[in-house]
């Protein structure tokens, strides 16, 4: 009987959480347009060079040789925590640009629609890489020595930035990218 | 009176959904959902006939109901697959990840659902029924329904979580179908779970279930009948620094 009650409670709780999630999603759909109203407010600065330095294996090897093991582990954890922050920022920017580009995909101008399409696919790939990279960075904090490939995140972010510029120029040729965002 | 309203009204409203889908050309995009809606109307009409002319909520009625439920459940899986396909078709970058998600989630949820059906198959109310075969049919049907609810609910929640993480935009009809189906699957999960433990009458559960289904039909109508609005980017208010840019450009032109 206790087992049946436990299962009942678990399933009902799952149902309630699911329902809450559906309501949040339906409300989130309405608030998505707020991001389109003012995308600049939601964009966060990302220093790619600093990020690449943080996950650079040579830099890590240099620190490992020149620091005491305890000191190295402490510093490495801090570096990886900062890297997580960078990847999160890049992923958040990708989310904002996704919304912006998704609206641009329906543009009557084929060039704009094409640039928007490419931006959508790149932003999606970046978020996918972020999904892989963040757990790996956390793993690196627990197990120093785990290699983190920053190249794909960095490359994708650069590609995405270029596409944003292109999309901005196509959508607002007289104003430039600053106003497109 | 309420019982009959909840039994008939949603299926009459589903007729409007079929009409709207044909009119808006959504039949080609969501053929499984169209089939599901049509099947639900037919099933309801058949059950109404059986209940009034063959067997008044007896064994025959429940047998027809069980077969209908099995077919309806199979079609609902088709609708969920259709939603996944419709969604990932628009985002080729996520095709691989989406397929992996669908397969992985199905596998994990299948294990959970089978485990649930094996370890918690009982229905408290059925133990008191005198007809052993009828009780067994009901117990099996509800256990299978519960297992399927776990699977469908889990798949839809996975799809919603995935779309939320990747900020994927839902076209109104797809979102409406998923929202209605998700609400229905969640409600089914909750009622079949409560049925396991709470010894309330079948009628109470049936009225609750039909009421929720009515709500889901209204959700489908809301999203399938109304015309989708295009999202607009509001860039009418110009940032202050635009004046500087224009001024610079003007100076450049004057100097040329």
Image (cartoon, coloured by chain):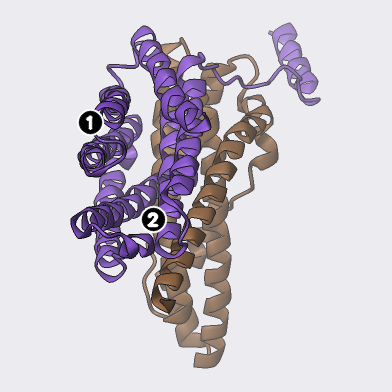
Chain colours: A brown, B purple
Closer to us: B32 or B208: B208
- Give the image quarter of residue B139: bottom left
Secondary structure at numbered mark 2: helix
Mark 2 vs mark 1, CA separation in Å: 70 Å
Can the viewer see residue A68? no
- Image side of residue A91 versus residue B23, left or right: right
Camera-side mark, 2 or 1: 1
Q: Looking at the rendered structure, which numbered label has been put on residue A151?
A: 2
Question: Is residue B236 shown above or below B155?
Answer: above
Task: Report the quarter where the C terminus of chain B lies.
Answer: top right
Locate residue A3, reporting x and y percent.
40, 76
Alpha-carbon neighbours of circle 2 within 10 Å: few (<14), some, or many (≥20)? few
Tell me, yes or no, whether the two marked residues, 2 and 1, touch with CB atoms within 8 Å: no
What residue is drawn where x is 46% and y is 68%?
A137
Q: Are marks 2 and 1 on the same chain?
A: no
Give left or right: position of A89 versus B171: right
Q: Name the residue under label 1.
A: B54
Chain holding disc 1: B
Residue B162 in view of the camera: yes
Name the secondary structure under disc 1: helix
**Residue A151 position within the rendered picture, expressed as x and y whole percent measured from the top left:** 39, 55
């Amino acid at each position: 009987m206790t087992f049946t009650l436990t299962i009942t409670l678990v399933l009902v709780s799952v149902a309630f959480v699911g329902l809450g999630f559906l309501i949040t999603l339906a409300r989130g759909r309405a608030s998505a347009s707020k991001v389109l109203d003012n995308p600049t407010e939601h964009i966060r600065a990302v220093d790619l060079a600093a990020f690449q330095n943080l996950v650079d294996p040579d830099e890590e090897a240099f620190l490992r040789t020149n620091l005491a093991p305890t000191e190295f582990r402490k510093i490495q954890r801090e570096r990886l925590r900062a890297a997580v922050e960078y990847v999160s920022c890049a992923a958040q920017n990708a989310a904002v640009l996704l919304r912006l580009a998704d609206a641009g995909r329906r543009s009557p101008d084929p060039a704009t629609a094409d640039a928007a399409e490419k931006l959508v696919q790149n932003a999606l790939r970046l978020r996918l890489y972020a999904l892989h990279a963040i757990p790996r960075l956390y793993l690196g904090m627990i197990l120093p020595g785990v290699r983190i490939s920053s190249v794909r995140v960095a490359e994708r972010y650069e590609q995405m930035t270029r596409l944003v510029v292109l999309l901005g120029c196509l959508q607002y040729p007289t104003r430039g990218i600053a106003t497109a965002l | 009176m309420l019982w009959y309203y909840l039994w008939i009204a949603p299926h009459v409203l589903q007729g409007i959904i079929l009409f709207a889908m044909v009119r808006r050309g959504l039949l080609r995009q969501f053929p499984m959902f169209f089939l599901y809606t049509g099947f639900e109307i037919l099933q309801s009409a058949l059950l109404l006939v059986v209940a009034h002319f063959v067997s008044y909520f007896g064994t025959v009625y429940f047998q027809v109901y069980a077969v209908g439920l099995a077919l309806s459940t199979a079609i609902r899986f088709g609708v969920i697959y259709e939603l996944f396909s419709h969604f990932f078709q628009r985002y080729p970058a996520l095709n691989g990840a989406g397929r992996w998600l669908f397969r992985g989630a199905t596998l994990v949820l299948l294990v959970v659902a089978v485990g649930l059906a094996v370890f918690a198959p009982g229905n408290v109310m059925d133990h008191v029924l005198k007809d052993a075969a009828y009780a067994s049919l009901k117990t099996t049907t509800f256990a299978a329904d519960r297992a399927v609810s776990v699977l469908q609910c889990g798949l839809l929640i996975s799809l919603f979580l995935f779309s939320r993480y990747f900020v994927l935009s839902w076209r109104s009809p797809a979102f409406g179908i998923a929202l209605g189906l998700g609400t229905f699957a969640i409600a089914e999960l909750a009622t079949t779970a409560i049925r396991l433990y709470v010894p309330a009458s079948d009628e109470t559960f049936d009225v609750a279930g039909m009421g929720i289904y009515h709500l889901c039909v209204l959700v489908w109508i809301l999203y399938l009948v109304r015309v989708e609005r295009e999202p607009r980017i509001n860039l009418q208010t110009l940032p202050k620094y635009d004046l500087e840019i224009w001024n610079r450009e003007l100076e450049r032109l004057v100097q040329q």
